[in-house]
Amino acid sequence: SSSSPSSSSSSSSYDLAIIGAGPVGFQAAIAASSYPFYRKKVCLIDCPTESGVLLGTQGQDLSIGGPTGLFSKALRDTSKRIRVSTLRGMGLREDSVWNEIICSCTDLAAQNADDVFRQLKFAGVQYIEGFAVFQPNCDGDGDLDNDTTTLISITTNNQHQNATTTTIRADNVLIATGSKPFRPEGIPFDGKRIFDSDSINQLSYLPKSIAITGSGIIAIEYAKIFRNLGAAVTLIIRDRAPMNALKKIGLDRDVAAVLVADLVRSGIRIERGAQVQSFHVPNSSQAPIKLVLEGRNGTPLPAGQTTELKCDTYLAAVGRKPNTASLNLQNMGIQLDEYGGILVDSKLRTITTTATDKKTPKNIYAAGDVVGRPFLASTGVAQGVAAVSAMFRHQIQQETTTTTDPNTCDPDDQACVDDGISMAGESFDPGSIASNPFAFPTGVWTSPEAAYYGLSLDQAKNDRGIANVGEAISLYAECLRGRVFNPNGILKLVYEKPAGRILGVHICGDDACELIHYGMELVKAKRTIADLTSSLYSAVTYHEMYRIAAEAALDESGARKRRAAAGAALAARNRQNRNDNNNNNNGMG
């Protein structure tokens, strides 16, 4: 089981107090406290019951330092390693099967938590467990008695002690409390049979059937997880075309098509253009939940479409919103957007209202999901480290050497990438990264994975004004490793003609979230199609697809014929696999 550093504090004054112990808060704490960085006195405030409710047997936070989707990532990994049909075939009871699955997830999370606590202790970070709230720091006249510090009250209340409240003082504060699921009105969430994407962590049984509302990454991720665990899965989406929702979150059209095709091939049922009108949850846990469906925005469903569903479990995965409601930010004069996201400047310092500007410390920063999209752990961590740099960089004297980068872009070159970080602003502030496709790679942990970096064909033409743009595709089934291990997938290069410079990379398939980083370097280094065709790649690796795609750019007609032949062979293979599985299931019955 995970053990945490002592949560008692010998001193109530810190150079930096960080509220929130997810990946953003954890990495920022390490950066601020460790050599060769700033070596500041740092406390990390963590409220486990607010971080996805992934708790150990002693109430310790197993999700500390991990992303919001830590549980789903562990469940995804477990669903690949454990065959539920095999366990059931061995005669194990349903509760024993689920215990085997959930214990594996807990072990993975506990290993991460143990290492996070070890790193915090080694770096000298004070870990404080409790719920943090900002306190106005005013004297009797209503003015700040010291405008360089902030007061935070921390309330602890766990199974080992009564509620206690202490107050700490910090020269700087970083808010990194993440996000929480959006809960639409009318859904009777109970944490037993009806869940959101956080409370699903508390699921205590393996459902035989589950209905999921949502068309984004989290919904698709859980749909594949539960299908891999043997459940009958129904995905309820408001759009008539599943691809449209995926394209809205940035996925290339062909990548989105591969992802949707995989859902269908997996046996996941998709109810298109639908939403849940009403829920009927029986008192008996053995009886199914009944969902009554209607068309989008309450319109009638087309004739012949399902209007009623029955399932063991229901999951609403319809987006997330910043987790800021209980921090007392308004009284501190910190401005929020309509969703509760914290408004920050280009240095990630919070923006205050004019009326309270003189009463609000200038040392409060925010990073990660609390400042809004893109809701990615990677960009959040970059923001957290950048905020620490903004706080303390001026205190450190460093000799720097200026060098000329041979890859410096021509200011008139709209497709050139100097560096993702510098183009997005040093702080990765949300205003800078929102419209910059070169700021960061995006990885989608569905099964199969999807990932992209740089421009799509439409972005290159419509947003960047590059008239002559091409696409080059390699199927996973065209490379040896893909054919042997997992042939379902695609890699696409977007490139400028006639020079062949690579502008974007889009992947769906095994290890896509790893493969994309090589693609990112190709784009940033301004590599060309010719560079890839002359490169040598190790045999039996997915990286061979980069060369195959580049060769396809040089022989478009021949490449289409080769892909058609490979696709036909793959389709026949998939049909044979389905037939074999059906025969095996019938034999077991």
Image (tube, helix red, strand yellow):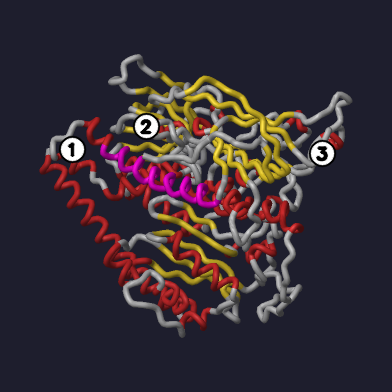
Q: Position of residue 411 (x, y in %)?
A: 76, 73
The magenta segment is 100-123
State the residue in front, 110 or 121: 121
Q: Is residue 126 above or below residue 129?
A: below
Magenta highlight on residue 109: yes
Q: Which mark is residue 88?
A: 1
Give the residue at mark 3. 147
Q: Earlier in the sequence, mark 2 or mark 1?
A: 2
**Mark 2 or 1, which is nearer the eye?**
2
Farthest bottom residue?
A: 534
Tell me: 91 left or right of 563: left
Which element type, helix, strand or loop, lies under badge 2? loop
Give the residue at mark 2. 57
Which element type, helix, strand or loop, lies under badge 1? helix
Q: Position of residue 257 (x, y in %)?
A: 44, 55
Q: Which mark is residue 111?
A: none
